Image (tube, grey):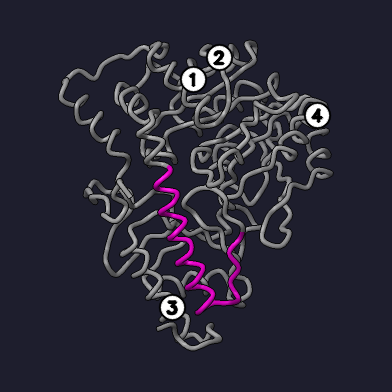
């Protein structure tokens, strides 16, 4: 391995972010515990020395071309330069889309369990969250297309937030699923805003299909992309929103600019130009290999000390979605159990009522930090009598 994923990222005391302690592991949140790609660090270091951090043209040809080339090479998706609309973050882009294409009181369709901040964005925009719940089948979730069509057919439900790869389940929707969504959206005139922030972290080449690449999707979609999850940049306010339809793009840009969009962050320009390169892709590939090994450690540990826990199918990202209902604990008891082991999880109920009894766990961390957390969890599990076999030696 040519990149270092074994060194804990420097913890800067600025009052927020992930706290790092040897006896307490934060497995909550989507923030990696490793440093971003060296090519980005080098580029930002060089840029910071320029001393000029002013207005930067969002239509910079070099920047736009980097995004176009990345989408073609990494996602297998050919896009036009004119489709790219830099924005101040994916949630900001979602809110701009909601305000541009719906009215107060309209319904916004989501599929819970789903990223918790969708609900906040919908509420802040004065719209109504309309849930078309996912159905758990074995170790994976499926869309309920009969329910989805019923929700789309309601005239007040004008927009859908589609998450792919899906957070928190960390699975990837199949092309057939996306085609069915697109057909229903076209039939019922629903705008689909697709959050594809995890798209670079798909484990199997070719599995991730951009929503706009399926039939019937081009004229009713807004695609949200970002460095956020791919390169651990969630602390920045930046995204590249891709909108194929000219009329939708114009309306979106009008709302984006009304929300006081100024110019491209010069630091994000430097970061994107460095990240969207062969070296950036190589770093992601090695990160995914490293996290795959981390997942094997987690699965082995849980199989030994908590065999009643089911880890769901995981095909993207550095997060695991696990079903702890077999332990027979309330969510409060489950949280207390993890905290007693010095491990902080994401509670599943944050992602909707259907997530109660589940946990989302971050495993994108150095091996030493992960094994420390697992050792403490195993000891706590055996103390509570969850294990059904002798300790692993």
Q: Earlier in the sequence, mark 3 or mark 1?
A: 1
Q: Circle 4 — which element? A: loop
The residues tagged by marks 4 and 3 sit, at their Cα atoms, a distance apart of 51 Å
Closest to the camera, between mark 4 and mark 3, is 3
Determine whether 315 is above or below 249 in the image: below
Are circles 4 and 1 on residues that touch, CB within 8 Å? no
Q: Circle 3 — which element? A: helix
Q: Earlier in the sequence, mark 4 or mark 2?
A: 2
Q: What secondary structure characterizes most of the magenta part?
A: helix
Q: Which mark is residue 378?
A: 3
Residue at image location 60% in from the left, 49% down from the top: 171
Closest to the camera, between mark 4 and mark 2, is 2
Q: Which mark is residue 80?
A: 2
Determine whether 15 is above or below 61 in the image: below
Q: Is residue 316 magenta?
A: no
Q: Nearer the viewer, residue 132 or 260?
A: 132
Closest to the camera, between mark 4 and mark 1, is 1
Q: Which residues are magenta?
A: 285-312
Q: Which mark is residue 68?
A: 1
Q: Earlier in the sequence, mark 4 or mark 1?
A: 1
Mark 2 neighbour class, 10 Å CA radius: few under 14, some 14 to 19, many 20 or more: few
The residues tagged by marks 4 and 1 sit, at their Cα atoms, a distance apart of 35 Å
Are circles 4 and 3 on residues that touch, CB within 8 Å? no
Q: Quadrant of the C terminus?
A: bottom left
The residues tagged by marks 3 and 1 sit, at their Cα atoms, a distance apart of 46 Å
Name the residue beneath numbered marker 4. Answer: 155
Residue at image location 66% in from the left, 43% down from the top: 173
Determine whether 326 is above or below 267 in the image: below
Count the labels in the image: 4
Q: Earlier in the sequence, mark 3 or mark 2?
A: 2
The residues tagged by marks 4 and 2 sit, at their Cα atoms, a distance apart of 32 Å
Q: Position of residue 191 (x, y in %)?
A: 69, 26
């Amino acid at each position: 391995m040519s990149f270092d994923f074994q060194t804990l990222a420097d913890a800067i005391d600025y009052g927020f972010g992930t706290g790092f302690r040897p006896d307490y592991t934060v497995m909550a949140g989507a923030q990696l515990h490793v440093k971003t790609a060296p090519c980005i660090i080098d580029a930002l270091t060089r840029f910071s020395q320029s001393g000029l951090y002013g207005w930067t043209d969002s239509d910079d040809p070099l920047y736009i071309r980097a995004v176009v080339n990345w989408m073609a090479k990494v996602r297998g998706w050919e896009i036009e330069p004119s489709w790219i609309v830099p924005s101040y973050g994916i949630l900001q882009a979602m809110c701009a889309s909601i305000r541009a294409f719906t009215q107060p009181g309209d319904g916004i369709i989501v599929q819970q369990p789903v990223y918790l901040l969708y609900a906040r964005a919908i509420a802040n925009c004065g719209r109504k969250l309309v849930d078309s719940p996912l159905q758990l089948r074995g170790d994976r979730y499926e869309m309920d297309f009969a329910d989805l069509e019923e929700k789309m057919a309601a005239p007040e439900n004008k927009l859908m937030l589609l998450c792919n790869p899906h957070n928190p389940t960390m699975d990837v929707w199949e092309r057939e699923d996306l085609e069915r969504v697109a057909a229903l959206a076209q039939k019922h005139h629903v705008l689909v805003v697709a959050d594809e922030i995890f798209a670079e972290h798909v484990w199997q080449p070719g599995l991730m299909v951009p929503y706009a690449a399926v039939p019937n999707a081009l004229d009713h979609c807004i695609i949200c992309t970002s460095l956020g999850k791919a390169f651990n940049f969630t602390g920045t306010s930046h995204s590249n929103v891709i909108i194929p339809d000219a009329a939708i793009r114009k309306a979106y840009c009008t709302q984006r600019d009304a929300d006081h969009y100024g110019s491209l962050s010069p630091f994000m320009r430097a970061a994107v130009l460095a990240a969207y390169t062969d070296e950036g892709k190589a770093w992601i590939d090695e990160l995914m290999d490293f996290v795959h090994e981390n997942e094997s450690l987690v699965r082995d540990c849980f199989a030994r000390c908590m065999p009643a826990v089911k880890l769901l199918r995981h095909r993207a990202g550095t997060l695991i979605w696990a079903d702890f209902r077999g332990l027979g604990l309330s969510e409060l008891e489950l949280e207390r159990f993890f905290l007693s082991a010095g491990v902080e999880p994401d509670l599943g109920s944050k992602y909707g009522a259907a997530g109660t009894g589940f946990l989302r766990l971050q495993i994108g961390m150095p091996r030493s930090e992960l094994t420390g957390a697992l050792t403490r969890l195993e000891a706590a599990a055996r103390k509570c009598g969850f294990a059904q076999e002798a300790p692993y030696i």
